[in-house]
Image: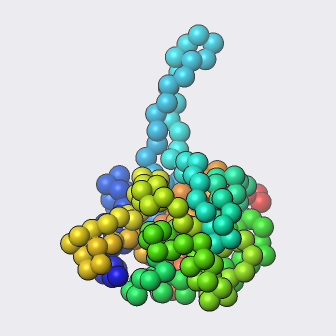
Amino acid sequence: MKVSTIPASFWRPLKASLLSASLLCCVFACNSAGDKLPVLGEKEVITRTVDGKTVTDSVAHQIPDFAFVDQYNDTVTAKTVAGKIYVADFFFTSCPTICPKMKVQLKRVYEKYKGNPDVMLLSHSIDPRHDSVSVLNEFAANLGVTGKQWLFLTGDRDKIYDIGQNSYMVTAQEDSSVPGGVVHSGAFILVDKDRHIRGIYDGTTAAGTDKLLNDIDRLLTEYKS
């Protein structure tokens, strides 16, 4: 099974709302040291009634509730990451191209924050028909991953694809135009404790992961202050 090349698979997933020069700058360029990380994604307009009056507010994009199964056969939901910063990505265990690069880079994140109760990693398989609980358990063990700080998730394929494209703003879908019929993003997505996306990074490169590591530190500092 093969995926598309890095540039096509990485940029294609970003929603049209992100493809402005200013927002791309927020995603990929370093902000000044004192600035907070931006909250990415389209705001949702909601209408509610307060004291008999209609009030319209806009709320930041937020990762919705979800339910998948990890390599230990435990159900993972939004409650699992409540009060934590986490990094999400999409992969499949038999991927011979960008996934091995991504896992080398994400292992760096795992090693740096191993034992930190405020940081988790969620890797979603886009090939759940093959990537069963036992396959993911073996995959994690071969990476040297122990404990429950880095979880490898499987579940309903459509729900995984949907949360990737509509919530994490990256693509994970079947595509008959590419060898193997599967395309997915090489992005790492940084999510804060309120399930807001605070950064999207090229997970296939050391430079992209260096930026992610820096921004995780900034986000941890933001919560401390």
Q: For this rendering, which residue is in front, 162 or 51?
A: 162
**Image: 139 above or below 21:** below
Question: Would residue 129 appear left or right of 120 to someone viewing this image?
Answer: left
Residue 160: x and y in percent read 47, 60
Whether residue 5 appears in this view of the structure is yes
Q: Residue at x 66, y 59 (%)?
A: 75
Whether residue 36 appears in this view of the structure is no
Which quadrant is the N terminus positioned in? bottom left
Q: Residue at x 33, y 79 (%)?
A: 3
**Image: 19 above or below 135:** above
Question: Would residue 172 appear left or right of 30 to someone viewing this image?
Answer: left
Q: For this rendering, which residue is in front, 166 or 177?
A: 177
Question: Would residue 166 appear left or right of 219 to someone viewing this image?
Answer: left
Q: Residue at x 54, y 66 (%)?
A: 154
**Image: 95 above or below 24:** below
Residue 172: x and y in percent read 39, 65
Name the image quarter holding residue 7: bottom left
Which quadrant is the C terminus positioned in? bottom right
Q: Residue at x 30, y 78 (%)?
A: 180
* Identity of the residue furthest to the left in this view: 177
Residue 150: x and y in percent read 66, 73
* Identity of the residue furthest to the top in this view: 52
